[in-house]
Every structure is written in structure tokens, then in C-alpha cells.
Image (cartoon, rainbow, N blue to C red):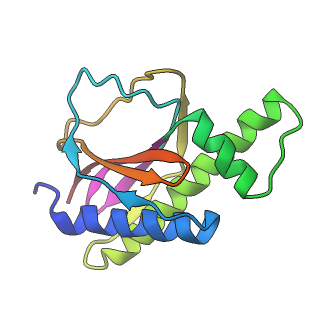
Amino acid sequence: GFMDTSVAKAFISSAQTTFRDMFDMAAEPQAPSAMTPDDDHGWDITGLVGLAGQGQGVVAIRLTHELLGKLLVGSGVVASGDAERRELEGGLVGELCNIIAGHATSALSTVNLEIAPPVIVRGPNHKIGWPAIAPVIRLPFVLPSGRFELDLCIRL
């Protein structure tokens, strides 16, 4: 059926915990909205994980380069050049994806969901091929030093 609020709540809570634990940052959730197909989103990088098992779907975390730079600095990592920075950014986004999806899916204990390895998509206004199984729900967050978004397309 349509994704209920318990799913969104699990992901919101997981994102807050993850940003607090990893970066000592408070992530303030903003009002959720439905994504429109012609969405010019303004994100630079997206990490995606697929969900399979008793439900299916895709979870994305979307960030700007600016915020990612701050998160890398906050985690004490210094890149020695562009190639390494790109690799570190991708690694961090993938890790965030895994941790947030992992916490959220274990919180949804009534549903057995498996998480596929993360995929990183980059570039200004890059397009995501959302599966046509459910509406895409945008969960925006504000941090002291920027903002990010979780996008959920999940059918349970």
C-alpha cells in the first residue's frame, strides 16, 4: 500500500540520529512534500539504496558539494586533491545512505527489508530513475551549516 507515516518517521528519526552521532549536528526536519516530475532540485550529489524483501523501493540522500565539504572536514578527513575528494565524498554519501537506511529498516521491525549497496549519482540537476511503484516523498532537513534531503519511494 501507500507508504504510511511510520515509514517516514523511521527515516526522519534515523537521519537525525545519524547526523548527531557522526557529525554532532542537529538535523531539523521540515515539512514533507511530494516530488513533481519536472523537479529542478539543485542537489550536487545523491546516494541511492534499493530496498527489497517484504517491500520494495528506493531511498535517496541528496546533498550539495558545499555541505559535503563541511561534513568531510567535520569527520577529520582531508583530501589531497580532486580525485581523492571525489572518492571521499562518494564514500561518505554511500555510508550515510547505508546507515540511515539500516537504522530505519531495523526500526520498521514488522517488515523485513534488505538494503542493496549504495549507488552515487552526481552532477547539477542530475536525474534519478525513480521506480513507478509509489509517489516520491521528499523529507527536507536543515542543519546548522546547510541542508539535505531524504527522498523515499517505497511500497510495502
Instruction: State the image quarter where residue 106 is shown.
Output: bottom left
Say if the magenta span includes residue 52: yes
In the rendered image, the vertical position of residue 136 relative to residue 53, given as above or below: above
In the rendered image, the vertical position of residue 24 relative to residue 118, given as above or below: below
Q: Nearer the viewer, residue 112 or 108?
A: 108
Assign the magenta stretch its main secondary structure: strand
Q: Where is residue 119 shown, x and y percent of the image?
A: 53, 40
Looking at the rendering, the stretch of residues picked out in magenta corresponds to: 49-62
Residue 54: tell me if it is visible.
no
Say if the magenta span includes residue 51: yes
Q: Where is residue 153 shown, x and y percent of the image?
A: 27, 46
Instruction: State the image quarter where residue 85 is shown.
Output: top right
Residue 110: tell me if it is visible.
yes
In the rendered image, the vertical position of residue 133 relative to residue 12, given as above or below: above
Q: Where is residue 92 shown, x and y percent of the image?
A: 65, 50
Is residue 28 shown left or right of residue 90?
left
